[in-house]
Amino acid sequence: MSVYTAEQKHKGPILSKSRREKTVSILCLILLIVLALIVMFPIYWIFRSSLMSNGELYAYPPAFTPPAWRFENYPETLKSFEYLKFLGNTMTILIPAVLGAVVTATMGGYAFARLRFRGKKFLFTLCVGSMLLPSMVTLIPIFFAWSKLGLVNTYWPLILPHFCGGGAFNIFLIRQFVKTVPRELDEAATIDGCGYFRILIFIIVPAIKSAMIVVGLLKFIELWNDLLQQVTYITRRDRYTLALGLNIFRGSFNDDWSSIMCATCLSFIPGIVFYLIGQKYFVEGIVMTGMKN
Amino acid sequence: MTVLTKKHMIRYNRGETRAAWICLLPSVIGLVCITYIPMIASFTLSLFNWNGLGEMKYIGLDNYIRLFTRDTKFYGSLLTTLEYACLSVIGSIIYSMIIAMLLNRKVPARGFFRAVFYLPYVLPVLAVYLGWKWLFDYNHGLFNYLIKLNGGTSVKFLDSSTMVTPSLALIAVWLSGNLIVIFLAGLQNVPRTYHEAAEIDGANAWHRFWKITIPCMTPIIFYNLLMSLVTNLQVITPALSLTQGGPGTGSYFMCYMLYTQAFKSHKYGYGSAIAVILFLIIAVFTGILFATSKGWIFYEGDEKE
């Protein structure tokens, strides 16, 4: 470090600092762009592969853009990949399960946040504790319970459990949000003659709408990706979900990577659409989740 | 006021209690019927020999003894699971922390970048694995092309028992967009005044990162660490969809072992014993995390409720 005169000391660092800051900013931006390209590249590569024939795919060196954009691959793939049926089956499971989870988690979260009753602490500990219990551990007994009821190969085992509070994490999340709603609102409503359920519906729910949407979206992703439960309970082909369908499709088209990549891209679509719809809430809601821990 | 309500007014209102129980009924049913009772059932079942149809035979700790002494694949499975969990937890925490730090700066099109890094998380995971299998392909995959381009020799990413775990962990890192968002939220919560004060005192960016950002972020790091550890120790999807546990025990994760032993070989007692061990492993890890947390987690005084 050189020695500054008083004047330099005053001017020098400020100037150089802003210049340095600018360089750092630009470097960071470049790094960010590079990383973004790396992260996106697999998705691009999959998409690009879906538009090529198998001959082109196996050529060396691989082409970075499809030599001919073979969009006809998609209708071709749809002939053997029952996309719409699988998607329909998936939605038959997901929509009721997500709704059930959101409603029951909201009720539970509200009770934990607002209502006073005996045993609340104990119950809350049990609830939070279950967050750390691996769900794998309960797989075998629950499977036998469902098979005793004769409901294996139906969608009930994949739907009904989500009507039970939608998981401890979601109850906890809703509770944290309800706590941010000013209590004065409840009190005013009580004075106006509202009962607990009316408070929940007319005061709490509108105030925590975004949290409920986040719970719904997170649940959606979780169930969408829960291959294990689907593999365990669904073995009949006509009941297959998108994930199971894709898995079996890969099995039967072992080396036809062009078709497999088409099917993969088709399965990406709902995820992307759904993300574009929910993006605002995701960020908003997850930002709040992070805060609350 | 609050003191008053807490100390003197604990008389539970009947209507309120009833409303609370009605609201909590689904959750309580869930906790009892699909969490705690099945847990106990799992523990019990692990002491029996049962093929799912015939008679259940009590065999004490035999299932466990067999696992630890006679099952040739058990230790492989255990090591694979631990290796995968370590690699993917550490990898995804570092990766998402770096991205979050970059996104926390004033960058143009921040929303767009955030969307880019978050996107892998929302894609259907099975499709993601299929896509990556193609990228990892030995002869025609992108990665091996890039390696050969730079003069290397092709790597069997998914077809060698040593490479398969790190390769799958790499996918897990790529998928960890949700951690980024949580980290980002935490970073935005770090008081600017701390940084400004430190800057005036002459601390450089490196020091500020270690002395301000990291300490303020420890609660969030703890949360992310805990959650991704619990999830990654329960990994099964890549084995179910891509590798079927192989090659060797390279992707024979404990959950996958449980699944195949129980649902493919119909050894339900044996599968339950694996479940119990998995439960204990997760309990030990969470225990360690919680026990050490007091030492390294920094809570701001005013954040306590």
Image (cartoon, helix red, strand yellow):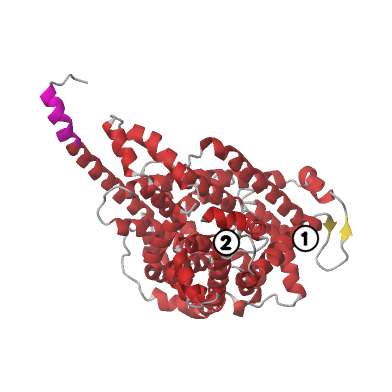
Which percent across, then down, holds residue A270?
44, 72
Question: Is A14 part of what is drawn in magenta?
Answer: yes
Would residue B6 be found to the left or right of residue B201 on screen? right
- Can the viewer see residue A290? yes
Which sits earlier in the primary sequence, circle 1 or circle 2? 1
Would residue A133 be found to the left or right of residue B67 on screen? left
- The span shown in magenta is A6-17
Q: Name the one closer to the observer, B270 or B219.
A: B219
| Whether residue B143 is situated above or below residue A280 in the rendered picture | above
Could you say which quadrant of the image residue A8 lies in? Answer: top left
- Can the viewer see residue A60? no
Labels 1 & 2 near each other (Cβ < 8 A): no
Which percent across, then down, holds residue A110?
54, 67
Question: Is B284 part of what is drawn in magenta?
Answer: no
What chain does mark 1 sit on? Answer: B
Would residue B17 be found to the left or right of residue A254 on screen? right
Q: CA distance from mark 1 to mark 2?
A: 28 Å
| Whether residue B207 is situated above or below residue A162 in the rendered picture | above
Residue that numbered label 1 is attached to: B41
Label 1 environment density (alpha carbons within 10 Å; few <14, some 14–19, many ≥20):
some
Mark 1 vs mark 2, foreground winner is 1
